Amino acid sequence: MSSDVRFTDFKSDKQPTWCPGCGDFGTMNGMMKALAETGNDPDNTFIVAGIGCSGKIGTYMHSYALHGVHGRALPVGIGVKMANPDLEVMVSGGDGDGYSIGAGHFIHAVRRNVDMSYVVMDNRIYGLTKGQASPTSREDFETSTSPDGPNQPPVNPKALALASGATFIAQSFSSNAQRHAEIVKQAVEHDGFGFVNVYSPCVTFNDVDTYDYFRDAIVDLDDTDHDPADRDQAKDKILESDKEYMGVLYQDEDSVPFEEREGVEGSMAEIPDGAPEGAMDLVREFY
Amino acid sequence: MPEDLNWAIGGEAGDGIDSTGKIFAQALSRAGRHVFTSKDFASRIRGGYTAYKVRTSVDRVESVVDRLDILIALTERTIHENEDELHEDSVIIYDGERSTMQDVEVPGDATALEVPLKRLAEDAGGAIMLNVVALGAACEVTGFPIENLDESLEKRFGDKGEAIVENNKEAARKGQHYVQEEYGEFDYDMETTDEDYVLLNGDEAIGMGAIAAGCRFYSGYPITPATDVMEYMTGRVDQFGGKVVQAEDELSAINMALGAARAGARAMTATSGPGIDLMTETFGLVATSETPLVICDVMRSGPSTGMPTKQEQGDLNMTLYGGHGEIPRFVVAPTTVSECFWKTVEAFNLAEKYQTPVFLVSDLAMAVTEQTFSPDTFDMDEVEIDRGKVVDEDEIDTWLDEKGRFQAHFAAADGVSPRAFPGTTDGAHMTTGLEHDELGRRTEDTDVRIEQVDKRQRKVETAREQEDFDYREFGDPDADTLVISWGSNEGALREGLTLLEEDGYDVRFLSVPYIFPRPDLSEEIEAAEDVIVVECNATGQFADVIEHDVLERVQRINKYNGVRFKADELATEIKQTLDTPAEATQ
């Protein structure tokens, strides 16, 4: 790790194909800043990206990275970190990737608490398939596949995380560059699973959850007396349906990452040229 | 056929059938006798019918047979379930004092040996030891020195304290003495030898092979009959710096293993049919991201949930063709319990040398069979590790493009690209399940697409040139009859060949462990008059593959009732097949 890493070192030479004005530009910039400011560099960083507009991030950033199967980014990230805890692992995806097709993995990644960060670009819409309802779309949000709205309440991912035993829950907003980078940085620094839901507006297909809507609705937790160490306060704020908060909602300062509790000590990549010493004892066990 | 003895204990699930059977099998193994075990079991925790069967001989035994000499029946149903395997010299040991065993009718001329198992166990210190009383009785019937049982009892009960061990030894002797006093001598006489064998099953052999091969990360989801691989590795792989993670489902299991492999670890997941279905989603990503990964499928009866505790070799097509699109892959199917170890080692080398998914295909028959081997069979000094084209910081410059970017999917002549583990300076690169260029960046460029598809496919051709994907040959090399099989049928066929030989049938038998890439059998098939492909499934999936390879009709022996092939049964089947004109079987 070198100390003179700049956030642009994490930028690849591929130009993003996101729509002009897409929230994902800001989300990605914040991720790069957070990684650079926490002393990481592209050669010790592993980004796992899901499928969707958000999933393209692996191509636009420069690091070790895998862009995988829809919904399965979190298990890949867990495997990377378990096999080499010295790497900085950041997983990123969208609301469809994380809370619909990958919802099962989300719950279990939260409770497993591996030391990594998970940045979800939540635009409350399926953008890449051109505008269908997502799991965080509003109940009455009209789309091509839900002409009268989905007719079901949106998923509350922060409540899901809290109920699953999360040790770090934060909400961010892509257009507030400074706060966004700070929040992601806190997630990276957290000893455990740092979950950040980012409002990352889709300017093409979502005319309800827009920049204007979020700017008006969002309350910065830094402007309140919220105590992120207090789980009950976090619960109340997360379940408030008429407010959009920004900042760290909950953090367990005593969190110990899974791989540490499991006694994983270093990279599993190095192995001997033949069977490991003591392997014949495995045979003798069968006497 | 070896001078064998076939022994079984049967009862309800929850009666301790497995552990009792294992104690006896271990005692035989330690006494220098070869053992081949099998299980009749159902997918339930309690009740039903379950049995642990032991075939033993001084010579090697490679199969089960349809003959039972000694049966310990804890329930009446156990006797009925095994009626067809009993003969006039069979001895059935049961507790006639139990209310449920009052009116037991012993079939045919078999000998009924009533032993008050429960009462004698209580005399020795507790009714719970009634199975051990039965073992003592069985020792007397078979002429097996009871001292051999003591070591197994110590191994099984040692952690429960010396008193428990002594009570069990006493319980065994009470069973032995009761038979001695009440029934006198039996004809069976089990020799012992000075050999010292190890006793293990196919799942354990796969787990041990994985650790020997340097596998350090295993993720899986419990499923019969693959769970034993996971249970074996749990705790043991930790001693070598590794970890087992129980995932929330198989989708997660294979993706975790993929992640670990991207990080540079040798990684594996194991499952059975229903789990393979879920994992199929990720096969393409493993192949196009060129990630070395061993995916083990311990097959059971399908389709859907099928018969979870029954044998079938029904996933050949799934492992050979599963997943949309076209990918290079290797499919390796060990043919014996000991080969489960060696083929696992080889699977890891193939995966890393060619950076592809390797399907290691085993089955329930091997997973539940405990078999004896000389410990030298698993000589760890023979384990070779080949990690392929891993590049470190000193070599990485060679693989950077003119802009200093690492070419993780470099279109090398042999199809194999350099591999840099994360953490390697200047090696940062991405990869994706999207079609990509040599840098791993998505592309839809037609030329690049063709270059990458061809490059991936070339790995198979390279492997064909560099590896020895050969068959294992048995029987008469000049015989006109050629029998071909894959996977676990090898043992039953080898013994079946001996039976056929006694009846004047000469057979050449090729046991094929490499499903893809596989040996070219054209010449062998051309040289034969009759070609028979044996496999445990209804449609003949391997036969299809072989026919496809040689464009010639073969005769097939198929079985799909949930029971593995048995030596004597196969001998009969093959005779029938040979005696029927080929046209009539089409």
Image (cartoon, rainbow, N blue to C red):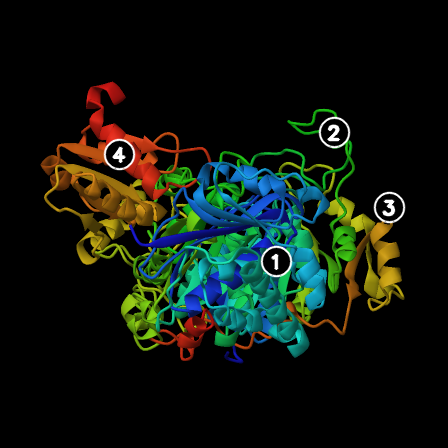
> Which subunit holds the residue at mark 1?
B
Q: Nearer the viewer, mark 1 or mark 2?
A: 1
Judge the density around disc 3: few (<14), some (14-19), many (≥20) Cα neighbours within 10 Å.
Answer: few
> Which subunit holds the residue at mark 2?
A
Q: Which residue is mark 2?
A: A149
Dots 3 and 1 on the same chain? no
Q: Nearer the viewer, mark 3 or mark 1?
A: 1
Left or right placement of residue B42 versus residue A124 in this view: left
Of helix, strand and loop, which one carries label 3? loop
The percent position of residue B40, horizontal first and vertical second, equals 52, 45
**Would residue B543 be seen by someone viewing this image from the given angle?**
no
The percent position of residue A168, horizontal first and vertical second, equals 73, 64
Of helix, strand and loop, which one carries label 2? loop
Q: Which residue is mark 1?
A: B131
Q: Nearer the viewer, residue A162 or A213?
A: A162
Q: Alpha-carbon distance for marks 1 and 2?
A: 65 Å
The percent position of residue B359, horizontal first and vertical second, equals 38, 50
Q: Which residue is mark 3?
A: A242
Q: Nearer the viewer, mark 3 or mark 4?
A: 4
At 52% from the left and 37% from the top, the residue drawn is: B107
Q: Which residue is mark 4?
A: B574
Dots 3 and 4 on the same chain? no
Q: Quadrant of the C terminus of chain A?
A: bottom left
* Total numbered labels placed on residues in the image: 4
Q: Alpha-carbon distance for marks 3 and 1?
A: 67 Å
Q: What residue type is disc 2 on?
A: Gly
